[in-house]
Image (cartoon, helix red, strand yellow):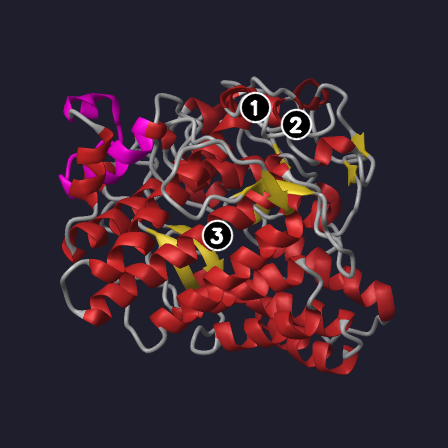
Amino acid sequence: MKFINKKTIFLAAASVVLSMVSSCERDYLETDPTDAVSEQLASGSIENLTTIINGMHRNMHLRQNSSQGQNGNIGIMIYMDVMGEDLIFPATGPNWYVSTIRWLDNANANSGNLFYPYDFYYEQIRMANIVIINAPTVPGDQAAKDKVMGEAHAFRAFSYYMLTQIYANRYVAGGNNAQLGVPLRLDLTFDPIPRASVEDVYTSINNDLTAAFTLLSGKARSNKSHFNADVVKGLMARVALTQGKYPEAATYAKEARAGFALMSNATYKAGFNNYTNGEWMWGYKPLDTTSDYFGNYMAYMSRNYNSSQIRQAPKVVNKLLFNQFAATDVRTQVIDPTGLHTSLNLPSTYSRVPYTSQKYLSVNGAGTVDNSVSLGDIPLMRSAEMYLIEAEALARASREADSKIVFDQFEKNRNPSYAGATTTGQAYINEILNSRRLELWGEGFRFLDLKRLNLPLDRTGTNFAPVVINNLVTVPAGDKRWTWLIPQSEIDASKGLVKQNDL
């Protein structure tokens, strides 16, 4: 692999050291004379390496280029959900993400939306490599060095996990997984390298997670925007589930969620905008001083922010999914089948669409629901996900009775009237999966879950507007479109050493 944005990546690392990235724009950093100077600045001290890590976290939720829809990992989370059947746009609105909804970007090697995840995660990997390689030799406290190295290993694992799920064929449990993964760059060179196998990439991911857990164990973090050992265990649970390593997934998920109690129903209905919520394990807090306004997560996902996106194309829940759950389930209580949302007193300019969600509500700096700002904290991992991973993994590991203990505990939190799971076998697993769909709606999992489970996309009978999906109703399981093409610019830069996926 040849890193396409060689200078951009070096300068991004240097920029956080120099505290010059409050707007996350990088063009003005061209004043730095050489890439080597940038890397030297970035890796010269433990303080600088710590600032790189802070910058990487900031990049997860702020724009790094001129495109409003490409705001770090949160933009990619939206990609992953709109390609499914449960997060619905009732109108094209200002056209954000519409080409992704139609499955056009993933099959177009020259698409900017296809290029963006590839570029973003490899930039994060480049900066993680700088930290991992330089931290052992910089002067400073060993505990501080362990923390930056631990976070860098976690970032590298997370980035390769996302890249491989998106740009490679699915991991097949029990197979040799020799299919092409992504280029595996663990050093600071730029010479083109070919794509590693999916198995080799997952081996590297797991090695990084093991290193991250060891380095971060026993160390406190400054806030929930950073990795700690619990979050790393949560990532280990995700990866094990994807690999079909169900006993390990169940164990990791149970260990990860310890200490993160499920939220109350009242808190659930407050708008998913406060990362002090005890259930949240990892999340980000955009600030007034770094707000991207129309690019913020809440500018796309909240019900109340006063933007053309929210007014014209509010986010709708698949009515077929909604109708599977009782009215006593709190997760249905943030979805309005009428679309009126009378409690929000929305202005008349807002479209009223049945089954719109107010799971997400934007708030002002005081934490009050406010449609004039697009602020609100962003969840990236919650203990709810860990309960669902544990329940699914136990069921698939032939421990259904143990699974039901976990699943019933979770479901009774969300629905006090829940009487307990009575289904068995695949029907019971489907119940877990449907709960996962509703629980994690809007959090970036649905496309990845469908691909992981080798299931088809099926929007038949849903409340999608035909003009939005442009007749993209079904995609068979195993279709080549589940694997995004490698960006053409990467193919060209590698002089053909990086091979393209099936066109």
For mark 1, what is the residue?
Answer: 491
Q: CA distance from mark 1 to mark 2?
A: 7 Å
Query: Which quadrant of the figure has residue 145?
Result: bottom left
Name the foreground residue: 140 vs 316: 140
Element under disc 3: helix
Query: Which quadrant of the figure has residue 347?
Result: top left
Residue 119: x %, y % from top left: 45, 32
Q: Is 257 situated above or below 226?
A: below
Element under disc 2: loop
**The disc labelled 3 sits on which kind of residue?**
Phe
**The disc labelled 1 sits on which kind of residue?**
Ile
Image quadrant occupied by the C terminus = top right
Q: Mark 1 or 3 closer to N-term? A: 3
Q: Mark 1 or 2 closer to N-term? A: 1
For mark 2, what is the residue?
Answer: 500
Q: Nearer the viewer, mark 3 or mark 2?
A: 2
Contact (Cβ within 8 Å) of mark 3 with mark 2: no
Q: Residues within 10 Å of mark 2 (few under 14, many from 20)?
A: some
For mark 3, what is the residue?
Answer: 158
From the image, give the main secondary structure of the stretch colored magenta.
helix
Q: Is 328 situated above or below 305?
A: below
Q: Is residue 188 magenta?
A: no
Residue 147: x %, y % from top left: 28, 65
Q: Residues within 10 Å of mark 1 (few under 14, many from 20)?
A: some
**The disc labelled 2 sits on which kind of residue?**
Gln
Residue 220: x %, y % from top left: 28, 72
Q: Is 331 situated above or below 194?
A: below
Q: Is 293 situated above or below 55?
A: above
Identify which residue is drawn at 28% across, 51% down. 53
